[in-house]
Image (tube, helix red, strand yellow):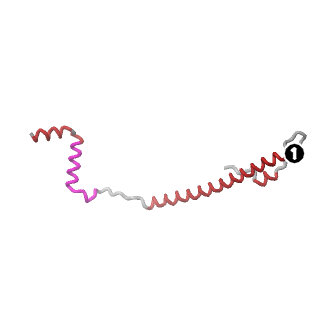
Amino acid sequence: MADKVLTTKDILQKEFKTSMRGYNPTEVDEYLDDVIRDYELYNKELTQLKAENERLLSKVDELTKQATLTKPTYSTQPSSTVTNFDILKRLSNLERHVFGSKLDEHDEHEEE
């Protein structure tokens, strides 16, 4: 970001040369007063945004550190709570998915 060239004091103390057909000095002063107010507001907002940016960057760093410290570990071994019944149920569902209506038709013929 480029360094600002003017300060509010620079704007306030700016002197313009007068000429025969120059600008109205009162009008110029009023306009410069408006510029100074805007400049101060922008400067204040910039300061606030920089502070907020720093706060958010710190929060991101903190959360990143927490995430790396509490990274979940996944076991490659199957859970010991899986029972034979669960395995048979899964096999049955897979058979129904793979063979579809053929199994249902076969079941109906056996019931007759």
Residue 92 lies left or right of residue 7; in this view the side is left
Q: Residue furthest left?
A: 112
**Dot 1 crowding, Cα within 10 Å, few <14, some 14–19, many 20+:** few
Where residue 34 appears, x then y in whole percent?
75, 49
Where residue 44 appears, x then y in whole percent?
67, 55
Residue behind mark 1: 17
Numbered range of the magenta stretch: 78-96
Under mark 1, the amino acid is Lys
What residue is rendered at 69% in x and 49% in y? 2
What residue is rendered at 90% in x and 40% in y? 20
Q: Nearer the viewer, residue 82 or 69?
A: 82
Q: Nearer the viewer, residue 61 or 48?
A: 48
Q: Nearer the viewer, residue 104 or 29?
A: 29
Above or below residue 73? Residue 97 is: above
Residue 88 lies left or right of residue 70; in this view the side is left
Q: What's the magenta bit mostly, secondary-structure-wise?
A: helix
Residue 58 lies left or right of residue 88; in this view the side is right
Where residue 97 appears, x then y in whole percent?
24, 42
5 part of magenta stretch? no
Q: Nearer the viewer, residue 81 or 101?
A: 101
88 part of magenta stretch? yes
